[in-house]
Amino acid sequence: MGMGLVRPIRRSVQQRRLIPNPLRSTQRASYRWSFTPAQAGPPGRFSEGFLLRRLHTTTSGGKLIFHIFGALAEFERDIIRERTNAGLAAARARGLVGGRRHLLTPKEIALVKKLYEDNTPIADICKTFKISRMTLWRYVKGK
């Protein structure tokens, strides 16, 4: 305990005893979040002790800090979402389409469907166009 949390009581001249000073919850919260310039380290940097202190959500001050951090995180997430959507809209305006490219062109898809209807072996169709059976089924079923 630091000396700020205790107070000396004199029982006699020879004997001194230190007992904890009862602090209100606001004083305890402010003590946990306060630090002296000596603890701050070099200018412009926080000390590790300040950054590693626990956030006590049982106190009103701790709840306030917790909610402020949550609001900042939500704000940051919304900003990222807005920027992402704006970037996608700008790409669409330039004519770019997102997603993976199709393996086959529309002409090749029509040819695959015709070969399938003509009862060409599935293994031969897949080997010719270098596609898997699942891809063949997707093109044949029209999905």
Image: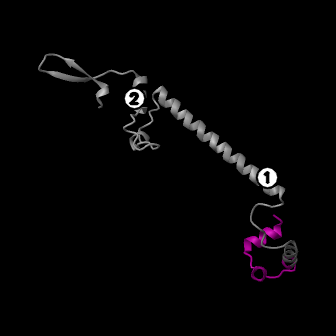
Q: Report which quarter residue 114 is drawn in.
A: bottom right
Residue occupying image coordinates x 48% and y 28%: 61
Say what amino acid the circle numbered 2 marks: Tyr
Measured in 3D between alpha carbons, the distance from the residue under mark 2 to the one under mark 1, in whole angstroms, is: 50 Å
x%, y% of residue 106?
86, 71
**Mark 2 highlights which residue?**
31
x%, y% of residue 26?
43, 23
- As displayed, is residue 18 above or below residue 51? above
- As displayed, is residue 98 above or below residue 119? above
Does residue 75 appear left or right of residue 92 in this picture?
left
- As displayed, is residue 26 above or below residue 66? above
Q: Are marks 2 and 1 in contact (CB under 8 Å)?
A: no
Q: For the residues carrying marks 2 and 1, which lies nearer the camera in this image?
A: 2
Q: Quadrant of the N terminus?
A: top left
**Mark 1 highlights which residue?**
89
Q: Secondary structure at mark 2?
A: helix
Residue occupying image coordinates x 16% and y 16%: 11
Coloring scheme used: one colour
Say what amino acid the circle numbered 1 marks: Ala
Task: Tell me where the magenta segment starts and ends, as one range.
Answer: 115-143
Does residue 71 appear left or right of residue 19 in this picture?
right
Q: Report which quarter residue 92 is drawn in.
A: bottom right
Sequence order check: which comes first, mark 2 or mark 1?
Answer: 2
Please state which of residues 52 and 63 is positioned toward the viewer in this rendering. 52
Q: Quadrant of the C terminus?
A: bottom right
